[in-house]
Amino acid sequence: MTPDDTRLEKIIPKRQAALVVERDPANCELATERLRRLGYQVVVCPNPAAAIDWCITSGHRFELLLIGIDWPTFDSVEAIAQLRTHPLTQAMPILVVSSLSLAELQNLGHVTEYLRKPYSRRELEAALNQARRPRVGT
């Protein structure tokens, strides 16, 4: 589902909410389906800039951001950095899913957890469990 900004509060029930930013429609559908099976209410965001806006100005608190990165673009890296520095989102778990290796994504120092594509539901669940653990220094 892709809501407009004014409707977020009406579509998010009391379950944990995850915001998914994934450029590829097939990967977005896969992430959405797997998160829903794990009990998340999923909101799909069209791009990293919108993710910043939805997380900070919508008034809704997401328990998780899952962002797909096929290459470390400035938009994605900057969005992650901005979310990490804002008081409302600095502690939110950020899970990056990518076909790139962790070494290729070294400039993403603000990521809570990394998952290599393709990934199974079990791998996603393990990464989510790891991402939800309290971070040192926050």
Image: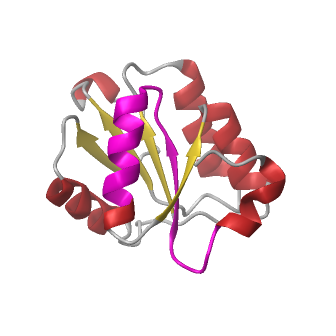
Give the residue drawn at x 32%, y 62%: 128
- Examine the rendered structure and indicate whether residue 127 appears above or below residue 40: above
Q: Is residue 21 visible?
A: yes
Give left or right: position of 6 versus 11: right
Number of callouts: 0
Q: Is residue 61 magenta?
A: no
Give left or right: position of 39 versus 47: left
Residue 78: x, y in percent?
Answer: 60, 30
Q: Which residues are magenta?
A: 12-35
Residue 21: x, y in percent?
Answer: 51, 39
Q: Is residue 30 magenta?
A: yes
Of residues 12 and 132, the one drawn nearer to the viewer in this rendering: 12
Give the residue drawn at x 53%, y 61%: 92
Of residues 109 and 59, the one drawn nearer to the viewer in this rendering: 59
Residue 113: x, y in percent?
Answer: 33, 51
Residue 79: x, y in percent?
Answer: 61, 36
Q: Is residue 112 visible?
A: no
- Examine the rendered structure and indicate whether residue 52 appears above or below residue 76: below
Give the residue drawn at x 46%, y 34%: 22
Give left or right: position of 76 versus 50: left
Give left or right: position of 37 versus 84: left
Q: Residue furthest front?
A: 1
Of residues 67 and 31, the one drawn nearer to the viewer in this rendering: 31
Give the residue drawn at x 22%, y 34%: 117
Of residues 29 and 51, the one drawn nearer to the viewer in this rendering: 29
Q: What's the image's color scheme?
A: secondary structure
